[in-house]
Image (cartoon, rainbow, N blue to C red):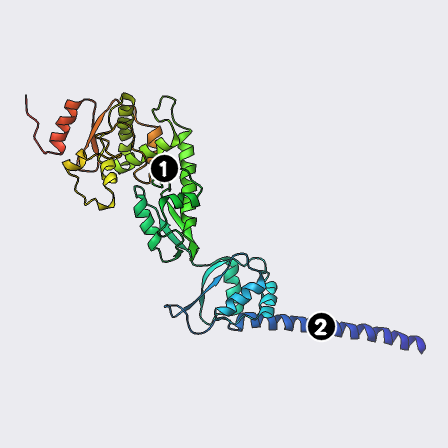
Amino acid sequence: MRRKIQGRSFFSKKKTWGLRLRSYFLAFIGLLILIYGGIFIWPAVPSHTNTQDTLVYKVKVAPQSGLSSIAQQLQEQGLSTPVLPFQISARALFVGSKLKPGTYLLPTGASLGKILLQIARGDRVRESIAIIPGMTIWQLRALVDSHPALIHQTKGISSKALLQSLNLNYPGDEGLFFPDTYVFDPDEPDINIYRRASLAMQKQLSQAWEQKSAGSPLKTPYELLILSSIIEKETGRRSDRGMVAAVFLNRLHKGMMLQTDPTIIYGIGPRFDGNLRKADLRKDSPYNTYMHKGLPPTPIAMPSKESLLAAVHPTQSNALYFVAKGDGTSHFSQTLSEHESAVDRYQRKLTPKSN
C-alpha cells in the first residue's frame, strides 16, 4: 500500500508540474499577445495633424539619440510615447538599436509599433537640391539661400568666408561645386551641400587631371577647371565638346587669344541682359578674352564631368575657330577665311558667292 501511494504521489506531482508549466506557457503567450497587441493597437500619434496634410503628423528625431531621448523628443512634439513603454516596445520589436534620425511623416492615429517600425526603416522625408551644369556661383548661392528645407548658415557671407568654411584655397568660389542632385534631410545646414559638392568636384577634377596628356598647355588642375567651365558654356552638345576643347587648346598652344563670348558675359555679371554688344567686347576686364591672352583668372561656371574630360581628351583637330550654326551645333574651321565664310553663312545669313 505504501508503494502505491508513493507511486501515485510521484505521478500526481508530475501532472501538477505539467499543468503549471502549461499555465505558465499560456500566461506567457497571453502576455505576449497583450504586449504586442498593445504596441500595435495603442495610438501614439494624435488623431489631428500638425502639418497642412490632414493625414500625417510631422516629427523630427535628432541624430545620435538613444531610446529614452527619442521617446522624450516625440513626447515634446505631441506624441504619446512614455519612456518606459517606448523602450519596452522597441526592444520587443528588436529595433532598439535601429532607430534612425530624420524627419518623419507619421499617419495620424498610428500605433506605437507602426511608428517604431517606420523609424527603424528610416522611412523619412528627404529633400534635394540640383546643381545644373553651367550654373554660376551667384545662381547657386541664390538657389541654396532660397531652399526652404535648409538651415541657412551661409546666407550673406562673403565668397572668402565660404571658402574658409570649406577649407578651400582658391582665388574665388566659382566652378568649385560639382553639378549633381544632392539629397539631404530637412533642416540640414546649407554648408553641408557646399561641402559635399566641393568634395565631389575635387574628386572629379583629380581624376580628370590624371588623364591629361604630357603635351597639354594646361599647367595646373585649376587651369583645367577654368577651361572646362568655358567649354561647358560654349556648347550644350556632347558631340561638339571635344572639338570646342581642341579649338581652345590649339589657341593656347599658339599663344592666341581665346576670344570667347561666355567669358565676357561672366565679366559683366548678373546684370547681363542677354544682349552682348560690341561695346562689351571693347571694355577691359580680366575676363575679356578678346583683349587678354590665356585663360581668365577663375572658372566662369560649374563644369560637368563631360566638359572636364573633353578638356583632357580633346578631338584631334587643327581647328582654331568655330561658329554656332543656330541648331545647337557649331561649324569648325582651321583658317580665318573659312571661319569668316561660316560666319557669313550661319550668323549673317549671307549666301556664299558662286565662282
Residue receiving disc 1: 171
Q: Secondary structure at mark 1?
A: loop
Q: Secondary structure at mark 2?
A: helix
Q: Residues within 10 Å of mark 2 (few under 14, many from 20)?
A: few
The quarter of the displayed image where residue 164 is located = top left
The quarter of the displayed image where residue 266 is located = top left
User: What's the residue type where badge 2 is placed?
Assistant: Tyr
Q: Position of residue 163 (x, y in %)?
A: 40, 43
Instruction: Establish if 265 lies above or below 313.
Output: below
Residue receiving disc 2: 24
Between the C-alphas of marks 1 and 2, the distance is: 76 Å
Q: Residue at x 25, y 43 (%)?
A: 269
The reply to whether residue 235 is in sight is: no
- Quadrant for the C terminus in the image: top left
Q: Residue at x 13, y 34 (%)?
A: 347
Q: Position of residue 13 (x, y in %)?
A: 82, 74
